[in-house]
Image: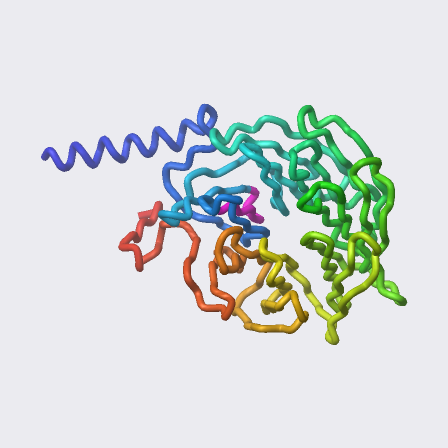
Amino acid sequence: MLNCVKQILIFSFIILSLCNTEAQPFKAVIQKGHGEVIKSARMTEDGKFLITVSRDKTAKIWDVLTGKEIRSFMGHDHTVNGFSQFDDLLATSSADKTVGIWELSTGELLWRDEMSDGYITSVAFSPSGEYLAVGSYEDSVTVLHGLDFSVVKKIKANTDKGTGYGVSVRFSPDGKYLAIGEDIRVAQLYHTKDWSLAHTFAPEQGWCGGCPSLTAFHQDEILKLSNSTPLTKYQLSTGDKTFESKNEFRDIAAVDYHVSGLNYLDATEDSIFVYKNENNQVIQKWTLEGEINDAAFHPLEDKIIVALDKIVLVTDYEGNELERYQGVLNQNQTGLDYDLGS
């Protein structure tokens, strides 16, 4: 009888917690993982947490030590395309045309604004948190002040609106540059001191609508990966091209440097390529079943974070799975097999 009473009390507590979403909308009692494809995944700089965003309209934060999701950020009305973290702030970009600013420690939505007449495709805090860059389907990138989110600057960008993927934004680690990846195989590099154009990185010929561009920085280098184009590397100070891959990449997903600068990677929707930075040689390549939407190096270890369909894999450089994040429900390997409909 006592066990029955305990079960009733526990079940009642879960139901009350779920119903009290207005008061505590970001505290998930039952952990389900993402219900739709994960669009982006990154570890926090201290390696203690994993942040993910998804087509299920949510962002989530996971405890790396336990593998459990510890908070859901609910408030967007459409796909969450990307995110950026600075200290206890999380910025999210969504297909609902808004940018959201959340407090990581509490899940509170601090600020949300409709900033475009189209999808918001990318957000990026500068390393100091002074600026937040916002890329979308509009013909400009908006730079906001990191404290009050007032508009600092609007920079023209070609999104090839109607057929393209919008633009990507990324600050250099020293905060001196903002890279804007346009949807025509072009990346523009701007000085953040006065928002003047530093360099334009573009193929020598050809036009490609619907060909997004992604960038990554390390010291005086920048990588550019565009659809239907070779991977290229440039020197920041001069703008000179220092490397171009022999093969072109289609259906691109990611490009990233390891924090040490010893390696870099690029990813397509089904493959990961890892390079040695010193000689630009591919040292590992592997293919995964499913759709890769993002890939990045672990901030502290020689591991790679891969957003694959509805899960996140952590692999070594050879593609061997080391960890997996997908929620704790319906995972027989953990001994949990809970069905809300049962």
- Residues 314 and 9: in front is 314
Counting from the top left corner in percent of width and height, residue 103 is at: 54, 30
Total numbered labels: 0
One can see residue 239 in this view: yes
- Residue 130: name its quadrant: top right
Q: Is 194 rendered above or below residue 300?
A: above
Q: Write down the region rendered in magenta.
A: 50-57
Counting from the top left corner in percent of width and height, residue 78 is at: 62, 42
Counting from the top left corner in percent of width and height, residue 199 is at: 85, 52
Name the quadrant of the N terminus. Answer: top left
One can see residue 161 in this view: no
- Residues 279 and 18: in front is 279
Residue at the extreme left of the image, as rendered: 1
**Would residue 294 be counted in the magenta stretch?**
no
- Residues 229 and 159: in front is 229
Residue drawn where x is 47% and y is 33% of the image: 26
Residue drawn where x is 56% and y is 29% of the image: 109
Counting from the top left corner in percent of width and height, residue 93 is at: 65, 41
Residue drawn where x is 84% and y is 46% of the image: 157
Residue drawn where x is 78% and y is 65% of the image: 242
